[in-house]
Image (tube, helix red, strand yellow):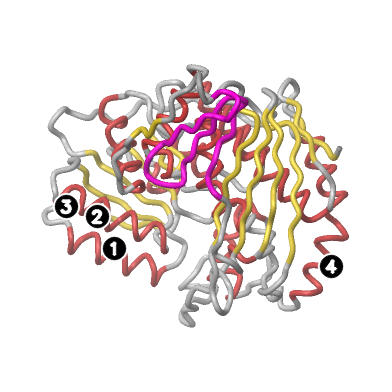
């Protein structure tokens, strides 16, 4: 990790063999399909008792927003438990949770399994690094806790398929994936229009997530107090990712490193691809290519520019642009044989293709604006209480992870990758 160029050369040299091994491993799940324990009872007027696993940037944001949603009467919810492997971070969030929630007892745990062992907690929000998402989510489901897991749902595709099977085996449990743009009404309306045949066969779509910075992306501040030992359980942080030499850059800025994150593809593009795939309903991705490069931020191990092409089993192609070195992206647009849907604003705009101008009336479907992350968390909490189905579910997230995983492989090894929905296997084309 100290020598970034050496890291990249080693990664590229081993990527083909590693990818082939992983492709063979993606098939019928061999990991245990756990059975959820009984959920803690929740009375109609009782506050939801929530825990948070991973209280860094995203976890801290969820903590403050959840407390505010309780204070403003949007949902009766108390954050009663926090977990993190970093002591200074955990101590600070514990003070915040205790000071900002009058009359609420809050406990902190360095080991998330101690939090899950409590029989009074209804649900957990997981905001740890993505290599931990699958194991912690499955452990939470087994413990009888509903789950909100931050995006991307997992780091690797085989983990996503495992989670999909675990949730299928526990249909009474609820798992929300933190792709908040699912709460924008324009995507709900687009799904209706497409399902009703309003644009004819949807042939081609485009979306993306592009932003820019002077010095590079995900350059979070480094806390020099955080060192392995009393202040940080580094072995636990590595966890499912395997043993690694301590590197403060990796700990504080792990999204920049391909071992721990898929960078732009998993952290940014999932926001845009998830609601687009929801609207289109074209089934599983079957072929993915990705061109990636290091054009500006050459110190970052992950790419700073990616361009994806995704083909689906129901005859559709999507192109996706991602960048951390230029903020101008693609217009968000779904093209059909008979009409287009423009989704770049808060509204869903239907525009007929010229040969069908006399058959289809152009129209704008007005959609109200929302704070999507707030709305997604409230949707989850409502379902924790009512047992209704939540909005951003595991099946769609698994399809998105096919794109994320295969695009990442393609960007590194220069090959197209295919996915077979019948056998649930991936391989280079």
Find disc 4 in the rendering and name its residue. Answer: 9
The one nearer the camera, 69 or 24, is 69
**Does 111 sit above or below residue 399?**
below
Find disc 1 in the rendering and name its residue. Answer: 94
Marks 4 and 2, how far apart at CA = 46 Å
Foreground mark, 4 or 1, reads 4
Which span of residues is magenta-colored?
Answer: 331-356
Marks 4 and 1, how far apart at CA = 42 Å
Q: Residue at x 57, y 46 (%)?
A: 207
Find disc 3 in the rendering and name its residue. Answer: 104
Foreground mark, 4 or 2, reads 4
- Locate residue 138 relative to residue 201 in the image: left or right: left
Answer whether labels 2 and 1 touch (C-beta < 8 Å). Answer: yes
Marks 2 and 1, how far apart at CA = 7 Å
Within 10 Å of disc 3 (Cα), the crowding (few <14, some 14-19, many 20+) is few
**Does 110 sit above or below residue 43?**
below
**Does 181 sit above or below residue 296?**
above
Q: Secondary structure at mark 1?
A: helix
Find disc 2 in the rendering and name its residue. Answer: 106
Q: Earlier in the sequence, mark 3 or mark 4?
A: 4
Answer whether labels 2 and 3 touch (C-beta < 8 Å). Answer: yes
Within 10 Å of disc 1 (Cα), the crowding (few <14, some 14-19, many 20+) is many
Foreground mark, 3 or 4, reads 4
């Amino acid at each position: 990790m100290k020598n970034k160029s050496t890291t990249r050369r080693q990664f590229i040299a081993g990527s083909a063999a590693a990818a082939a091994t992983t492709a063979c491993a993606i098939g019928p799940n061999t990991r245990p399909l756990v059975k959820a324990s009984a959920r803690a009872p929740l009375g109609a007027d009782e506050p939801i008792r929530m825990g948070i696993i991973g209280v860094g940037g995203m976890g801290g944001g969820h903590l403050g927003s959840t407390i505010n949603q309780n204070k403003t009467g949007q949902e009766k919810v108390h954050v009663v438990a926090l977990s993190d492997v970093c002591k200074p971070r955990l101590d600070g969030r514990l003070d915040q949770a205790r000071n900002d929630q009058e009359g609420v007892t809050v406990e902190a745990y360095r080991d998330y399994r101690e939090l899950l062992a409590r029989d009074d907690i209804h649900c957990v929000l997981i905001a740890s690094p993505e290599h931990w998402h699958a194991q912690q989510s499955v452990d939470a489901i087994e413990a009888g806790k509903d789950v909100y897991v931050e995006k991307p749902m997992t780091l690797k595709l085989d983990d996503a398929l495992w989670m999909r099977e675990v949730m299928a085996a526990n249909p009474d449990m609820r798992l929300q994936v933190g792709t908040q743009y699912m709460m924008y009404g324009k995507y709900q309306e687009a799904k209706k229009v497409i399902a009703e045949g309003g644009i004819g066969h949807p042939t081609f779509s485009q979306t993306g997530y592009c932003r820019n910075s002077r010095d590079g992306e995900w350059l979070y501040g480094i806390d020099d107090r955080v060192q392995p030992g009393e202040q940080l359980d580094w072995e636990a942080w590595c966890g499912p990712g395997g043993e690694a030499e301590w590197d403060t850059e990796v700990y504080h800025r792990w999204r920049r490193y391909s071992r721990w994150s898929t960078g732009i593809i998993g952290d940014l593009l999932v926001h845009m691809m998830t609601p687009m795939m929801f609207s289109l309903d074209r089934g599983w991705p079957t072929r993915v290519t990705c061109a990636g490069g290091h054009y500006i931020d050459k110190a970052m191990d992950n790419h700073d520019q990616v361009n994806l092409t995704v083909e689906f089993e129901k005859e559709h192609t999507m192109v996706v642009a991602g960048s951390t070195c230029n903020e101008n992206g693609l217009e968000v647009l779904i093209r059909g044989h008979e009409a287009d849907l423009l989704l770049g604003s808060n509204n869903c705009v239907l525009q007929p293709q010229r040969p069908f101008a006399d058959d289809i009336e152009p129209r704008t479907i007005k959609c109200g604006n929302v704070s999507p992350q707030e709305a997604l968390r409230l949707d989850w909490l409502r379902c924790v209480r009512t047992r209704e189905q939540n909005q951003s579910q595991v099946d769609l997230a698994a399809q998105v992870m096919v794109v994320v995983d295969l695009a990442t492989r393609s960007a590194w090894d220069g090959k197209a990758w295919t996915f077979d929905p019948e056998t649930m296997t991936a391989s280079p084309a």
